[in-house]
Image (cartoon, rainbow, N blue to C red):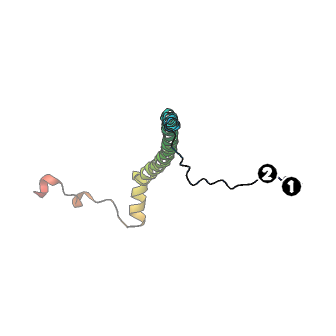
Amino acid sequence: MPSAYVVRRQVVNAYLVRERDRRRLRELVYVLLAVLPLVAGLVVYTWLQLETLRVRYRIEALERRAHRLEQIERQLRLESAYLAEPKRLAERAGGELGLVQPSVAQVVFLEEWR
């Protein structure tokens, strides 16, 4: 039921100007200055943890590689010792290359050669 005494008028806000609240801005700056060192500390701590983890993975990979290389070196030393065995060399020289022991007449000593 409409009332006869109610008159609706539009509110004109064209003349209202919003002023900046300097106190609120100052409080925001204080909060940011208080929180910024905490955030910076957290970022540095996280970065250090990630670097530590990356270095640990790198060290582990290098240790695995060093172990692999030690095994290869051990295997090559055994193979070298096997291949340099005098008895085996003599058999191979006689069998594959047809070499025989030189006679005393074929041996030339260094003092005689000069």
Query: Which of the pair 4/91 is nearer the observer?
Result: 4
Q: Going 49% across and 41% down the picture, which residue do you hit?
A: 47
Q: Going 32% across and 59% down the picture, which residue do you hit?
A: 101
Amino acid beneath label 2:
Val
Question: For residue 112, which quarter of the picture?
Answer: bottom left
Say if mark 2 contacts mark 1, CB within 8 Å: yes
Q: Going 22% across and 60% down the picture, which residue do you hit?
A: 105
Up the image or down, 52 lies above or below 114; here it is: above
Query: Which of the pair 64/68 is nearer the observer?
Result: 64
Up the image or down, 62 lies above or below 112; here it is: above
Question: For residue 9, which quarter of the picture?
Answer: bottom right
Amino acid beneath label 1:
Pro
Q: CA distance from mark 2 to mark 1?
A: 8 Å
Instruction: Indicate the secondary structure of the residue bearing disc 2.
Output: loop
Q: List x then y, in percent, for residue 110.
A: 16, 54
- Quick check: 91 left or right of 19? left
Report the quarter where the C terminus lies: bottom left
Mark 2 = which residue? Answer: 6
* Mark 2 Cα shell of 10 Å, populated few (<14), some (14-19), many (≥20): few
Instruction: Indicate the secondary structure of the residue bearing disc 1.
Output: loop
Task: Name the mark on residue 2.
Answer: 1
